[in-house]
Amino acid sequence: MRLTTSQRDTYRETGFLIVEGVLSAAQVAEGRQVIEGFVERSRGLTESDAIFDLEPAHSAERPAIRRLKAPHRIHPFFADLIRSDAILDPLEDVLGPDIRMLGSKLNLKSAGVGSPVEWHQDLAFHPHSNDDLCAIGIAFDDCSLQNGCLLVMPGSHRGPVLDHHQDGVFVGAVDVRAQGIDIAAATPVEMPAGSIEIHHVRMLHGSAPNRSPNPRRLLLFDMAAADAFPFAVSIGDWDAFNAGIVRGQPTLTPRITEQPPVRLPFPTRKTGTIYEVQSQLRESAFAGATPKM
Ligand SMILES: O=C(O)CCC(=O)C(=O)O
């Protein structure tokens, strides 16, 4: 499904976009079944590993996965999805014809225990030579304020990468109170299962805990124009780097554009998933009640 001119304008102006009905009911059902299989598998675990990031409340009796770390590497359903026209066509309208997948993650936000994600901009984690990057989120459940849908600050994608440091260390989160950011102005990304949302790499976003009886499973792919090259992060093996090209051609010519300031995510004290890095933030923006928008 290609984006309409009005959808492209919305993305350019606000920094995010929701498109409903991208996955069929059968694909949503298959995805849920695959995810349930991993939840069953996690019963035997007592700590997180290379595949599973477990919620603090996880137990064999009540398994609760916070995140599947790189779903495209562990199941063909997810690998096929990011190479499908349904997902790549709208991405091409946002990123151009040559597209690299930087990585994937599936945040499960289990009913009643799903952890929050503190406010952040993805570009703070992986600054690039230009900012034609985005994340695409694929909903396997209806996403609402009640079950901890994504919250975005429209227009923030036009601003600088904000301070994600505390005490001189990268904590992967913006202290919104200290930086005077009014999160009451945030927009909830509410959408039915089978929808996608695309948000710009500079978009300030986060999400509240899931205190509802319903899960909120969101598959996310970090995507980049193939001529956006990472700053300060080793490319490593060239062929492995280019294995991430999911449409079009790789290039040896980085496109360097003028963009609002970026900041490098160094020094680090703690690495791992965003939940682990953000655990260093002194005060959660989501402590207490689910915010009302
Ligand atoms: O799952 C969410 O609500 C937010 C995910 C996110 O922003 C991230 O994992 O970087």
Image: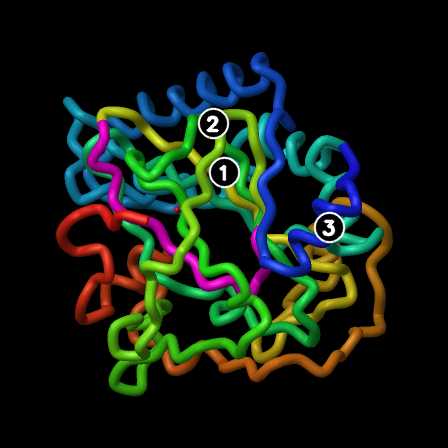
Amino acid, disc 2: Phe
Relative side of 124 to 245, left or right: left
Q: Quadrant of residue 196?
A: top right
Front residue of 151/228: it is 151
Residue at disc 1, secondary structure? strand
Question: What kind of residue is marked 3?
Answer: Arg
Q: Are marks 1 and 2 in contact (CB under 8 Å)?
A: yes
Magenta segment boundaries in residue numbering? 199-212
Percent position of residue 124, x then y: 48, 71
Residue 8 is tagged as 3
**Residue at left offset 79%, top offset 74%:** 255
- In this figure, which residue is indicated by the disc labeled 1? 219
Q: Is residue 31 magenta?
A: no
Tell me what residue is drawn at x 54 percent, y 29 percent.
75
- Write down the residue under mark 2: 140
Could you classify mark 1 by the number of other residues whose Cα lies within 10 Å: few (under 14), some (14-19), or many (20 or more)? many
147 vs 266: above or below: above
Q: Is the magenta stretch mostly helix, strand or loop?
A: loop
Task: Name which residue lies at 60% across and 81% down.
Answer: 260
Question: The disc labelled 1 sits on which kind of residue?
Answer: Leu
- The secondary element bearing badge 3 is classed as helix
Residue 171 on image: x %, y % = 32, 72
Give residue 186's position: percent from left, percent from top: 40, 56
Q: Earlier in the sequence, mark 2 or mark 3?
A: 3
Upstream in sequence: badge 1 or badge 2:
2
Viewed as shown, does residue 277 lie left or right of 91?
left
Q: In this view, does 180 lie above or below 209?
A: below
